[in-house]
Image (spheres, grey):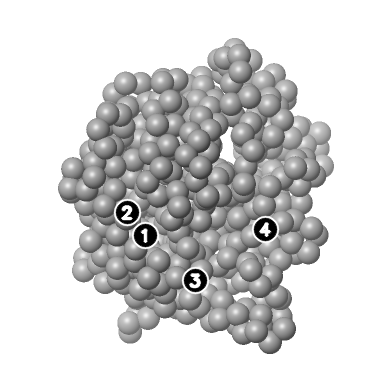
Amino acid sequence: MTETIHFPSNFTWGVATSAFQIEGAAAADGKGPSIWDTFSHTPGKIIDHSNGDVACDHYHRYREDVALMAGLGVDAYRFSMAWSRVQPAGKGAWNEQGFDFYARLLDALQERGIAPHLTLYHWDLPKGLQDDGGWMARATAHRFADYAHEVARRFGDRLATIATHNEPWCTANLGYGNAQFAPGVADKKQAIQVSHHLLLSHGLAMQAMRATGTRAGLGIVLNQWTADPATDSEADKRLAALEWANSIAWFMDPIFKKRYPELSLQAHGSVAPDVHAGDFDIIAQPLDFLGVNYYRREVMSAEVPPRKPEGGNGFTDMGWEIYPQGLTELLVQLKADYPDLPPVYITENGMAAVDALEGGQVDDQVRIDYVRTHLEALKAAMDRGIDVRGYFLWSLMDNFEWNSGYAKRFGIVWVDYATLERVPKASALWYRDFIARQRRDRRAA
């Protein structure tokens, strides 16, 4: 069907990565340590006992990687900045060598006509700030605004968009709720308070960046999903409603409605966050765009053990159900719940698969099918009036997949971690041809 669907002529086609997952060069040119440097070197935290010291060595191979993007024909590249590379302690002096790296990357992208879409924070808090309390400290929100202001001041005229945070749900719930991610805390009350400080830091950063007069579009990237009851039972329906409130509305309501969802506050009770007067006015800054990362849905079951999703389209190597129609359902629901929804970018969508390099090629047809069906679902949402401006496939290349280490491959480009050779997979060639076909159709129209 993707051969016959047509996206708007100005639709953005891109790929995405994040700094810690690909850059390596963990201590090069004055970079300070981040919480993920510390976490990945802590025994027992990473499944394959690896770390991000080298990763894909993008820091030294960025020109090769930009050439790969150009070969795909993408319009745009979404990437994150390593805060501790440009401000080693997360406060105090700036590191000019770190900024120089990102300036060179922007030069390379400009030479190839690829628009840069920057994310300020993709989970790698400078260790210096973690030592001061991390995201549990309200002061960290103000340090983040200082960082955002400096980046926008330096690069705001060279960036297409700037997102404050990537997936604050993960920072709070995986970093502070169950210790799966850095900094490795397991405390529900801390997780909920951290989520508030993250939202506060977003609002402060939006104000700080707008004060620079930047022309870049400003927004935030949230991971989102539908929450479906496993059965028609009232218990399952209640669980689904609570999941939506805790995971989607918890981050959307403060931005668009200046409040937290009542259902969540009732459920949280004594561990509800400490909110200062005026916080919601800061958080609810107008967005130029909303980034949506979509991978799966949640199926909520009150049974013991819980009823699992049927997985009619299969599961990814992460164990996530493949459910493309959920992307349509999610976007339509967001527009219904938030009528003033700004333009949307699908800032991440993709899958981990068990890939194998054979004869110099990687045949990842399962990933092609995943992307194809999700693009069909995306177009269905757009046909229902949802303003979606672009799609970023996750990920450009295999990389350090957080606590899974290098055991999970999301890339459309294979990376040999022993040699760091890059090999475009079948999905990369498919995506290249799909983008080219969209452009041919534009010219023919």
Q: State the CA–CA distance, disc 1 to disc 2.
A: 6 Å
**Classed neighbour count for the residue bearing mark 3: other residues with Cα under 10 Å, few (<14), some (14–19), many (≥20):** many
Residue 181 visible at all: no
Q: State the CA–CA distance, disc 1 to disc 4.
A: 25 Å
Seen at 65% across and 84% down, the residue is: 443
Residue 32: where, in percent of width, then height? 23, 38
The answer to whether 209 is drawn above or below residue 26 in the figure is: above
Seen at 39% across and 28% down, the residue is: 143
Residue sitting nearer the eye, 108 or 318: 108
Check disc 3 and give the amino acid type: Val
Which circle, 3 or 2, is nearer the viewer? Answer: 2
Asked which quadrant contains residue 67, the reply is: bottom left
Which circle, 2 or 4, is nearer the viewer? Answer: 2
Q: Earlier in the sequence, mark 3 or mark 4?
A: 3
Q: Is residue 117 left or right of residue 235?
A: left
Q: State the CA–CA distance, disc 3 to disc 1.
A: 15 Å
Q: Find disc 1 in the rendering and name its residue.
A: 106
Mark seen at residue 140: none
Q: Find disc 4 in the rendering and name its residue.
A: 388
Q: Earlier in the sequence, mark 3 or mark 1?
A: 3
**Classed neighbour count for the residue bearing mark 1: other residues with Cα under 10 Å, few (<14), some (14–19), many (≥20):** some
Cβ–Cβ below 8 Å for labels 1 and 4? Answer: no
Seen at 71% across and 80% down, the residue is: 4
**Classed neighbour count for the residue bearing mark 2: other residues with Cα under 10 Å, few (<14), some (14–19), many (≥20):** some
Which circle, 1 or 4, is nearer the viewer? Answer: 1
Mark seen at residue 102: 2
SS state under label 3? loop
SS state under label 2? helix
Mark seen at residue 74: 3
Check disc 4 and give the amino acid type: Val
